């Protein structure tokens, strides 16, 4: 029996026994029969024992039964599911209620903290989206106003400004398409269509497509695998992943540096790593590199182009494959991104 229940019944039994005994002795006094024989002491003891067990029984079957129902209701509302039934006699219901209420309070505190973080993230996200879209919109507006103010008749200006406006429009389209892709990946609307393909051949194809940009900085590609390696994944989406990682390695790699693509087997999985010896990422930025629009060096990143959504898309595509992306880096020491795919 619970300690609280014992104490409660014991104290209440003493109170009731004292009250009934005083009343009984007062009755005897009024009848002129004032004495304290052994029979009266036995009566007092039997009265206490009877009261104690009656209270214990009533507590178990009434008071603590009601407390069990309260506990059940708390658990039900806390977990939003069917909770335990009435607790058997002997459980410390008061302690259980205390623990459930304390747990409920912790849950609410954690939920409030989470909502605060989400609110902060929402504000940052809206601010980032508006900033990213505002730049090309203002550029387009400036080019159009210049053309309307007479630049349209100047052959040295009109085509140049139209081409610049077109680039800004293309940047806006890329941002919107990337946001749409992330939204579809998060909500599950974008369905992954896995197939068996050679990831080595895919990586070579992407590197060849980036050779001109790499050559402009003197960067060389190193693919540490020659024979085919087959994986089972969505070929189109994995192309996006590899393209984003390889393009980033060229953008932020140092001049006359190297971008290496390592593909190796790990039991039933294939490990893919894209590494460079570029500017690297300092430790304070590492936890946030996969956030939407997060840029380590904002001015330099925008000069390099891109939407600021590439790594976020990479993260979501791999999560849709039930995999994660890992990054190891340090400022000035390059960066290495790695992930796993199922062997095909």
Image: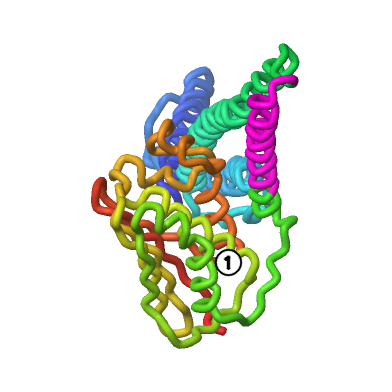
In the figure, 332 relative to 198: above or below?
above
Q: Residue at x 72, y 14 (%)?
A: 150
Q: Please tell me which residue lies in front, 297 or 186.
A: 297
Q: Please tell me which residue lies in front, 116 or 291.
A: 291
Q: Residue at x 49, y 60 (%)?
A: 210
- Does the stretch in magenta take in 275? no
- In this figure, which colouring scheme has been used for the structure? rainbow
Q: Please tell me which residue lies in front, 258 or 143.
A: 143
**Which residue is identified by label 1?**
238
Residue projecting furthest to the top: 149
Residue range of the region highlighted in magenta in the rendering: 153-180
Residue projecting furthest to the front: 155
Residue 325 in sight in this render: yes
Residue 63: name its quadrant: top right
Q: Residue at x 61, y 41 (%)?
A: 74
- Does the stretch in magenta take in 177? yes
The C terminus - image quarter: bottom right
Q: Position of residue 238 (x, y in %)?
A: 58, 66
Q: Position of residue 64 (x, y in %)?
A: 58, 44
Side (left or right) of 73 relative to 281: right
Residue 191: name its quadrant: bottom right
């Amino acid at each position: 029996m619970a300690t609280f229940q014992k104490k409660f019944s014991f104290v209440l039994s003493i109170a009731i026994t004292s009250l009934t005994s005083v009343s009984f002795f007062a009755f005897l006094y009024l009848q002129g029969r004032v004495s304290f024989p052994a029979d009266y002491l036995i009566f007092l003891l039997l009265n206490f024992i009877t009261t104690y067990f009656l209270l214990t029984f009533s507590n178990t079957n009434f008071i603590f039964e009601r407390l069990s129902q309260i506990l059940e209701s708390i658990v039900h509302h806390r977990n939003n599911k069917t909770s335990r039934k009435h607790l058997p006699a002997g459980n410390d219901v008061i302690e259980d209620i205390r623990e459930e209420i304390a747990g409920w309070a912790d849950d609410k505190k954690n939920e409030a903290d989470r909502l605060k973080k989400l609110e902060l993230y929402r504000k940052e996200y809206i601010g980032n989206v508006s900033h990213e879209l505002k730049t090309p919109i203002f550029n387009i507006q400036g080019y159009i106003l210049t053309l309307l103010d007479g630049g349209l008749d100047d052959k040295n200006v009109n085509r140049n400004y139209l081409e610049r406006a077109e680039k800004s429009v293309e940047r806006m389209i890329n941002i919107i398409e990337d946001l749409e892709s992330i939204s579809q990946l998060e909500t599950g609307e974008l369905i992954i269509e896995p197939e068996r393909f050679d990831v080595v051949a895919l990586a070579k194809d992407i590197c060849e497509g980036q050779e001109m940009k790499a050559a402009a900085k003197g960067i060389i590609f190193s693919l540490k695998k020659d024979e085919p390696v087959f994986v089972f994944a969505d070929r189109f989406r994995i192309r996006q992943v590899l393209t984003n990682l390889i393009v980033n390695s060229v953008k932020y790699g140092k001049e006359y540096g190297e971008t290496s693509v390592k593909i190796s087997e790990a039991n039933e999985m294939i490990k893919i790593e894209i590494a460079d010896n570029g500017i690297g990422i300092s430790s304070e930025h590492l936890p946030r590199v996969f956030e939407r629009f997060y840029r380590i060096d904002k001015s330099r990143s925008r000069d390099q182009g891109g939407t600021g959504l590439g790594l976020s898309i990479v993260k979501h595509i791999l999560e849709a494959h039930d995999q994660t992306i890992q990054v190891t880096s340090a400022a000035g020491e390059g960066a290495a991104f790695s992930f796993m795919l199922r062997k095909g």
